Amino acid sequence: MADGGAPLLPDSLLYHIFLSLGPGDVLAAGLVCRQWRAVARDEFLWREQFYRYFQVARDVPRHPAATSWYDEFRRLYDAVPCVEVQTLTAHTDQVLHLSFAHSGGRFASCSKDCTVKIWSNGLAISLLHSADMRPYNWSYTQFSQFNRDDSLLLASGVFLGPHNSSSGEIAVISLDTFVLLSRVRNKPYDVFGCWLTETCLISGNLHRIGDITSCSVLWLNNAFQDVESENVNVVKRLFKIQNLNASTIRTVMVADCGRFDSPDLLLDAGPAAGPCRVFDLGADGDSDEEGTGRAPGPARPRGPRRLLNSALDTQAPLSERVLETRVAELLAQGHTKPPEPGAADARTKYLIFTTGCLTYSPHQIGIKQILPHQMTTAGPVLGEGHGSDAFFDALDHVIDVHGHIIGMGLSPDHRYLYVNSRAWPRGAVVADPMQPPPIAEEIDLQVFDLKTMREVKRALRAHRAYTPNDECFFIFLDVSRDFVASGAEDRHGYIWDRHYNICLAKLRHEDVVNSVVFSPCEQELLLTASDDATIKAWRSPRALRLLQAAPRLRPRPFFSWFGSHRR
């Protein structure tokens, strides 16, 4: 200040000086005097700092829930769970999956050591229970999910058997007594299984029809299999879906349509990163032949002779596999039940899974409406529609990602589906269903709006994978209100901001990171699971400071959040 109390430097000059400083220096300068503090909190200054530091495209607006650019900078810098706070080593082999209870007070882990472990999530994480599944002829555990009221845990595993065996099982564990309540067969094992209601879960079965043709049957199972009343079913067929070209249904999950109209974060449609075709198969009751993109042709007379003539109606000789696929497609034309009429309402749920129509590698996302009357095991157990010619159920929507899908996750509001995929080369053609195109090392994280069935934003990139098609495995991702996280084969977990589409953190492990999961009650806590047999807990710098300062609350300096341990 000058002798008369007037500032020696006008605010406009200070502003231009501060523009040349980094965020840490700006915060430190704000401690000099009240004038500098006021300039150091200028909105236009922090807007520039934000776009420059995080390298966000200038045409991307500020997060709709943000109150200021300063607070938004601080959120991305200080509220991302990137500080390792605990390493859990109770597993003795690769840790494959993590899942949180809805309350956030517990989580479960699955591992190649064939145990399901249940943990208490407090200030320090502790082990509550370990269930060894080897007595049930399991090879390893691979997936778990808490039911809606956190009273039951679904655990999915793989049976011991030959290397090419696809059989698995689902177990239901009581979270009050840790008693195993029931077991349900699950084939192929990478259907995983999921909860539909608090007491009903979905499993799968696979029936071979030909060399590369099969059908997947999805079953609705009561978690309590000891129901004594003869009027109450414990299992009911939900859907029967045709598989072509060695494909199968895998990775089932359920989205609640009743939550679509109140999303936590509304994502605007943006340019897609690659080819993505969406087929609305329920628009007029006719299917697009399992989402192949071919327009349905005119109706043809039925009968084995006409079907065979149609399949052979070509100048070039057909291989056995191509002939089998064509005959299967033609048979399905007159024996597939069309989607239920009517749009999804608040009571409807979507069954979402990976599938395909060209090859065995999962390259499509199938979506099937589950109506309220289908959400119970009451009614006929087998053979619904015995008097009908409909063998199969048609899908409502199919999304083709033109690549190998290796992970899926729903946003907390169930409006958006995030998909990890490894792209095929542009213009790749599948000539042999047993030899899919090579896949990219880069993993694309794509986002689909389940209300509009369209891709939104652009694909997120940073993480990588190296295994070929026939060795490719699932990498679980998770979505919180503001962030999306994923594992990768490059020994890191990754966190992106959902609104700005930028990578905010890389979380180091010693081997492949298979699974990540946010606490549903606290997105500033993230868990990661790895092939290095560890589970790591990560908290944000802000959360860590609050935990450390809790016994001795005291004011913090203006720039204390811009700490050295963040990066």
Image (tube, rainbow, N blue to C red):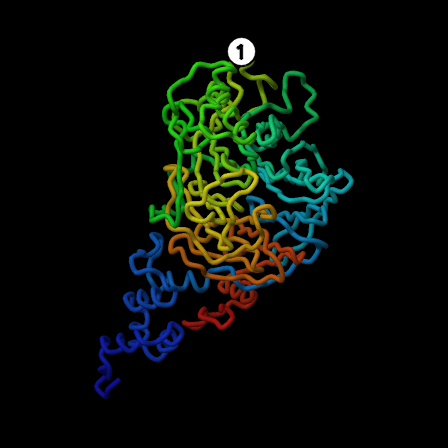
Residue at x-position 67% and y-position 49%: 111
Query: Splitting the image into 4 quarters, where does residue 379 fall?
Result: top right
Counting other residues with Cα less than 10 Å from the Cα at mark 1, is it few (<14), some (14-19), or many (20 or more)? few
Residue 546 percent across, percent down from the top left:
52, 63
Whether residue 411 is visible = no
* Secondary structure at numbered mark 1: loop
Q: Residue furthest top?
A: 387
Residue at x-position 58% and y-position 28%: 214
Q: Is 19 placed left or right of 350 in the picture?
A: left
Which image quarter is the N terminus in?
A: bottom left
Compared to 531, does 149 lie above or below? above
Choose between 176 and 341: the one closer to the eye: 341
Residue 94 percent across, percent down from the top left:
67, 53
Q: Residue furthest bottom?
A: 3
Residue 69 percent across, percent down from the top left:
33, 62
**Residue ID for mark 1:** 387
Q: Amino acid at mark 1?
A: Gly
Choose between 546 and 390: the one closer to the eye: 390
